[in-house]
Amino acid sequence: ELKVEQNPLFLSMQEGKNYTIYCNYSTTSDRLYWYRQDPGKSLESLFVLLSNGAVKQEGRLMASLDTKARLSTLHITAAVHDLSATYFCAVDNSEDYGQNFVFGPGTRLSVLP
Amino acid sequence: NAGVMQNPRHLVRRRGQEARLRCSPMKGHSHVYWYRQLPEEGLKFMVYLQKENIIDESGMPKERFSAEFPKEGPSILRIQQVVRGDSAAYFCASSQGIGRNTEAFFGQGTRLTVV
């Protein structure tokens, strides 16, 4: 059974600082997704990582995937308050890309002024 | 192009009643997925449907829950005889296909409260 873990689960950081959120998963997969969720809202797609070594960047966020280590990272550079949200990684558990996602528990990020 | 539309946004039911959650996928999308999110947790896969077919229901509870995606109209997630433990946010996602580069888009969710 595929399990997806994230750490930390809670992260409080000051504006301007850098930090990394880690996502580990238990079986082989080369399809990993990062989402952002604001309280009471839906999930916003941030990154789609589809191969070993994939690296994508958007603004202050950068995501990478190491399929051999079964690890993805979401790096935050010079955090700003607007990045406060819960971040989920999700691994596609389907053999035929049916998008049966297994989500991590989420990392709740608070960026303090 | 409207996104994935779910309604109602909030639904309150008494124990024993039925809950019907609707999901209209994005235009041109024929694949629908339902997920459940319990408070303070990640989303858990429930079911994957294409028009008129259930493809993968491995995450659906064996009793009281059913889902359909008819030829015409929205996808429906139906929960019969609701219990307090059914209180959660239910999210629907849709995709155009199932290819490797296909992305699923999520709706706003329906927050079900069972009192």
Image (cartoon, coloured by chain):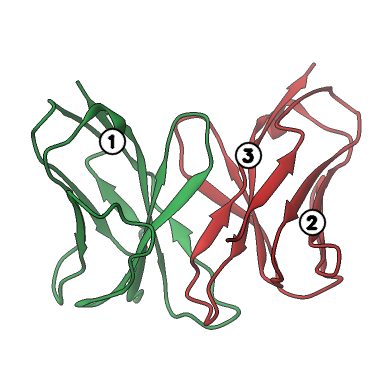
Chain colours: A red, B green
Q: Is residue A85 above or below residue A66?
A: above
- State the SS at label 1: helix
Q: Residue furthest top?
A: A113
Tag 3 residue: A106
Where's residue B62, x and y in %? Answer: 25, 55
Instruction: Find the distance from the CA under tag 2 to the CA under tag 1.
Output: 32 Å
The quarter holding residue B74 reads bottom left
What residue is shown at x 53% (from left), y 78% (from top)?
A: A97
N-terminal-most mark, 2 or 3: 2
> Which one is in front in this view, the residue at disc 3 or the one at disc 1?
1
Q: Quadrant of the C terminus of chain B?
A: top left
What residue is shown at x 15% (from left), y 77% (from top)?
A: B71
Chain bearing mark 2: A
Q: Residue furthest left?
A: B17
> Which residue type does callout 3 highlight?
Gly
Where's residue A25, x and y in %? Answer: 71, 57
Q: Is residue A30 left or right of residue B6?
A: right
Where's residue B31, x and y in %? Answer: 36, 73
What residue is shown at x 13% (from left), y 27% (from top)?
A: B15
Tag 1 residue: B86
Instruction: Find the distance from the CA under tag 3 to the CA under tag 1.
Output: 21 Å
Instruction: Find the distance from the CA under tag 2 to the CA under tag 3.
Output: 13 Å
Res. A1 in view: yes
